[in-house]
Image (tube, coloured by chain):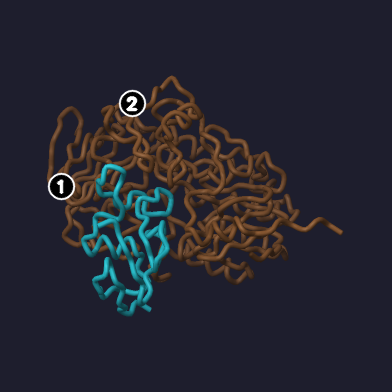
Chain colours: A brown, B cyan
Amino acid sequence: MNRSHVDVLVVGAGPAGLAAATAAADRGRRVLVLDQAPEVGGQIWRHRDPATLPESARAAIIRARASGVVFATGATVLDAASPTELVIAFGPRTDRVRADTVILATGAVERFLPFPGWTLPGVVGVGGLQALVKGGLSVRGQRIVVAGTGPLLYPVAATLAKAGATLLAVLEQRTLGDLVPFARSTLGDLAKVRDAIRYRAAIGRTPFHHDAWVLAAHGSQRVREVVLRLGSRETTIACDWVATAAGLVPRTDLARLLGCALDGEAVQVDAAQRTTVPGVLAVGECTGVKGEAAGMLEGEIAGAAAAGDDGPARTLARRRAQGIAFGDLLAETFAPRAELLARATPDVLLCRCEDVPVGAVEPAWTARQAKLWTRVGMGACQGAVCGPACTTMFGWEVPQVRAPLGTPTCGAWHAQLTTPTDPPAA
Amino acid sequence: MNRDVTITIDGVPRRVVEGDLLAAVLLSHDVTTFRRDTHERPRAPLCGMGTCYECRVTVDGVSSVRACLLPVRDGMRVETGR
């Protein structure tokens, strides 16, 4: 294992991470950006061909590259020797990187809530199916139901329609009335209105239901039909894919490993994006889901702060606050409704990695008790899926995490275990 | 870029597009059992972005590789839970 040092280490190459990296590099800092994916851009700017990206995204990526930032894609953080020295699997090899400042831009993941049939092949996330299609999955002619919540539904439906899928229905769990304050607030934002119109046009005549969600998926080797709640009625339809989730949740596993305090489910930060751990900043969706524009602004603030420049933290303070307010409105508007939390019968799996059914845990327990007694959240994904589900369904606190993060391949973790400790300073 | 290459899926050679994500390639070839749970039930990708670990397969002898993060390369040998 090698050790190296950079001035600023950014974890996550989405909009917020790229903006942070660029701002630090523009101020003369040596910056390394890590991402697990094979390409930079994060989930929202996931692409194979840069020509398919919106102009603003392409410009941000070009600017980051031009600023001298070094990118390591296919890189996963496994552990931390200290909050500012991370153990990283670069493909099959494991190295340590020490930094003066670590900037977490780990984004968000989908919030999955269990329902009968949710472990069947063919039942995927909303953003999950979009990611697979962008990765080369052909859905031409495939019958798809998209059921989720929030603004993500539109671009995903548009991607699927463009890929030739037969979109059977798009479901938003919230009622139309629930969305009024949100719609009113976005009317002033021309870019958001333009996007909404473009996406609505792309999904054409596909039925769009409000007050609607998935009750169950049926099939043996894969999903064959899905039971939907559409307002007051129930209907069962045959399909090939069910793309469903209950919105997004900040991805905070690395932040928790480093000891950063959370504010609810998000990483707690101050006006310069500093976490509660010295030397560790956090930006974008991991500090609260609020969209790419707000994330890029936070990235700029943090990247400058990492280079000792608190100017942007002051000059961008008002826009930063607007971004946070928008995030709060998103969270409030699209919070999963009570019916979504009560779909799983006792036999339905809660923890998909350790095969723990919902009926095996008691809501009155703590997350720690549940782990000790049932192994819930202790499998391959380390609670990335069932953790947010338990927080939502039972009100459990976000659990602590232990290294390694996720499940490294044998080669990567063996390299970490066999690293000799630092020789004592002479 | 985007040239065709050959990988083997459970021993069967398949022509695929280089750079496509392995999870997408497997699903496009009707693989629905990436792995099996403790009751032998089939599992396949959920999150599509590296967090859920449902898509883990064995690639060139290395187990627990997340297929959703791995672009396919010529000659890759993939073993699923089938």
The residue that disc 1 covers is A224
Subunit ID for the residue under disc 2: A
In the image, residue A268 lies at what x, y percent?
60, 38
Please say if A251 is above or below A235.
below
What amino acid is found at the position of numbered circle 2 in the picture?
Ala
Location of the C terminus of chain A (image quadrant): bottom right
Taking the image as shown, residue A418 lies to the left or right of residue A168, namely right
Q: Residues within 10 Å of mark 1 (few under 14, many from 20)?
A: some
Residue depicted at 13% across the width and 38% down the height: A236
Residue depicted at 62% across the width and 60% down the height: A21
The residue that disc 2 covers is A338
What amino acid is found at the position of numbered circle 1 in the picture?
Arg
Taking the image as shown, residue B39 lies to the left or right of residue A410, namely left
Location of the N terminus of chain A (image quadrant): bottom right
Residue depicted at 39% across the width and 40% down the height: A111
The mark closer to the camera, 1 or 2, is 1
Residue depicted at 37% across the width and 37% down the height: A351
Circles 1 and 2: CB atoms closer than 8 Å: no
Q: Residues within 10 Å of mark 2 (few under 14, many from 20)?
A: few
Name the one closer to the observer, A409 or A362: A409
For this orientation, the residue located farthest to the right is A426
For this orientation, the residue located farthest to the top is A364
Name the one closer to the observer, A398 or B35: B35
